[in-house]
């Protein structure tokens, strides 16, 4: 047995180990780390004696440890904001009026194109820091506001650089088929042929695309157009995912499942056939309650159907300037519970194990199991439900990424 570098002791674990029921709770837990990976996570009595040799012991004072949180759907890299548009909407302006006044997604595209790669990194870091401060150790970031080959690549390069600027894992997703830019209005076919498909190849060649996404919607791309993008992704060997059935039911969930998609996201209008297809394909339902809340949607995703068919459910922020200016995964969990009726277990699994599954990274992250990356969040909470229950309060005590990170030793007032 190898020697552990660090052993986190006196902890209560929510391991999310799928072999255990519920959250996979271990009351008298320890996590032993070696070379940035979990050597052992479980009951202290089962800690291999050899793991103790030469290892630093970190006393967690009885606090809870979960896997590091994973935000599996964001548009974190963007430029500018749409606060003025929000103000106009509050004053009663319609989406069309805002678009005519130069607002909407077009304004985000204009800002993005004007920004340099350095600007994008600088603008995105405060948003990333907000996520990291809540224990996020992996974040997915999409392109989709550049809508030229050069500007989409610029977004993804900025996304990659975030991983170097902070100790966080970044999964980058090509979302060229997000919106049709003004210069291609009414010519989606040309836009796909001239920008989305060649841009995808360029992103892949530069190692900038871990997955491929699209926005399948009446105001965006049709199912047939999405198929073109997915066929190209498959040829490159890239996994796919889809913004599906957010505002209407174009059967995007079933389309994504037909391609073996990692996830289908939003899903407010998904029907039972869509849920059944997702279950069969193992496609994760990524629910985005922040966008539902912000656009004051009233139709909820069919959580009961997902449960009935055994579709795995993840939760994410959808952090974007138009429909979800949200940088709190803890709040997304609370919204998942209050707005969509998810259980505490579903919410916590949704930002750990199921989020990892939605990124195709479950073999590496998302649970506290031997062999995985030692990404941990240590919480000052008395019970896991508190992570979902509070609004606007951050009980993170420490964040451990690949075994590294300081755990303050101060007392937390008696939780231990
Ligand atoms: N779903 C959305 O709600 C948006 N994009 C997407 O794929 C909104 C994009 C925006 O308005 O900036
Ligand atoms: Fe989105």
Image (cartoon, rainbow, N blue to C red):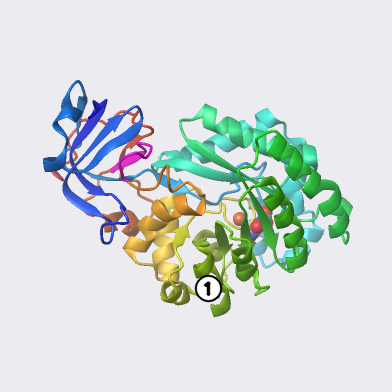
Considering the image in quadrants, where does the N terminus appear?
Answer: top left
Lateral position of residue 322 relative to residue 299, left or right: right
| Magenta-span inclusion, residue 372 | yes
On the question of residue 91 being in view, the answer is yes
| Magenta-span inclusion, residue 199 | no
Picture coordinates of residue 321, whole percent (x, y):
63, 50
Q: Which residue is mark 1?
A: 275
Q: How many other residues sit within 10 Å of disc 1, few (<14), some (14-19) or many (≥20)?
A: many
Lateral position of residue 48 relative to residue 300, left or right: left
Residue at 86 percent of width and 58 percent of height? 189
412 lies above or below 263? above
Ligand 2 - quadrant of the structure image: bottom right
Magenta segment boundaries in residue numbering: 368-378
Identity of the residue furthest to the left in this view? 45
Q: Main secondary structure of the magenta part?
A: loop
Tell me where residue 368 sits by quadrant: top left
Picture coordinates of residue 37, whole percent (x, y):
34, 33
Residue at 59 percent of width and 65 percent of height? 257
Identity of the residue furthest to the bottom in this view? 272
Residue at 41 percent of width and 57 percent of height? 350
Identity of the residue furthest to the top in this view? 54
Decide if ligand 2 comes within 8 Å of the CB at mark 1: no
Tell me where residue 240 sits by quadrant: bottom right
Picture coordinates of residue 341, whole percent (x, y):
40, 71
**Front position in the image: 290 or 402:** 402
74 lies above or below 409? below
On the question of residue 98 being in view, the answer is no
Number of numbered discs overlaid on the protein picture: 1
Tell me where residue 370 sits by quadrant: top left
Picture coordinates of residue 75, whole percent (x, y):
61, 48
Q: Secondary structure at mark 1?
A: helix
Considering the image in quadrants, where does the C terminus appear?
Answer: top left
């Amino acid at each position: 047995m190898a020697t552990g570098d660090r052993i986190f002791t006196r902890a209560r674990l929510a391991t999310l180990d799928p072999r255990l029921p519920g959250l996979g709770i271990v009351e008298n837990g320890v996590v032993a780390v070696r070379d940035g990976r979990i050597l052992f996570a479980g009951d202290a009595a089962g800690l291999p004696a050899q793991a103790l040799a030469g290892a630093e012991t970190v006393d967690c004072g009885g606090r809870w440890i979960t896997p590091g949180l994973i935000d599996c759907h964001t548009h974190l890299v963007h430029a500018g904001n749409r606060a003025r548009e929000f103000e106009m909407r509050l004053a009663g302006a319609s989406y069309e009026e805002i678009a005519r006044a130069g607002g909407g997604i077009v304004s985000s595209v204009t800002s993005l194109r004007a920004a340099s790669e350095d600007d994008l990194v600088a603008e995105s870091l405060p948003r990333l820091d907000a996520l990291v401060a809540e224990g996020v150790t992996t974040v997915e970031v999409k392109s989709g506001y550049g809508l030229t080959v050069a500007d989409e690549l610029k977004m993804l390069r900025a996304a990659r650089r975030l991983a170097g600027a902070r100790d966080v894992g970044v999964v980058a997703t090509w979302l060229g088929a997000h919106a049709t830019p003004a210069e291609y209005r009414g010519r989606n076919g040309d836009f796909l042929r001239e920008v989305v498909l060649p841009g995808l190849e360029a992103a892949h060649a530069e190692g900038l695309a871990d997955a491929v996404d699209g926005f399948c919607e009446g105001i965006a791309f049709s199912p047939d157009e999405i198929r073109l993008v997915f066929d190209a992704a498959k040829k490159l060997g890239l996994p796919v995912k889809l913004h599906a059935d957010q505002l209407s039911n174009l059967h995007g969930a079933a389309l994504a499942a037909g391609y073996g998609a990692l996830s289908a996201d939003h899903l407010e209008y998904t029907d039972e056939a869509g849920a059944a297809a997702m279950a069969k394909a193992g496609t994760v339902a990524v629910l985005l309650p922040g966008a539902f809340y912000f656009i004051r949607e009233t139709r909820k995703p069919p959580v009961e159907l997902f449960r009935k068919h055994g579709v795995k459910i993840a939760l994410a922020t959808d952090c974007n300037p138009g429909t979800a200016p949200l940088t709190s995964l803890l709040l997304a969990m609370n919204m998942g519970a209050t707005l969509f009726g998810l259980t505490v277990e579903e919410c916590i699994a949704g930002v750990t194990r199921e989020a990892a599954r939605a990124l195709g990274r479950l073999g590496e992250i998302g649970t506290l199991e031997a062999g995985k990356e030692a990404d941990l969040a240590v919480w000052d909470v008395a019970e896991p439900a508190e992570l979902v229950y509070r609004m606007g309060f951050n009980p993170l005590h420490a964040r451990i990424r690949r075994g590294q990170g300081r755990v303050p030793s101060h007392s937390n007032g008696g939780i231990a």
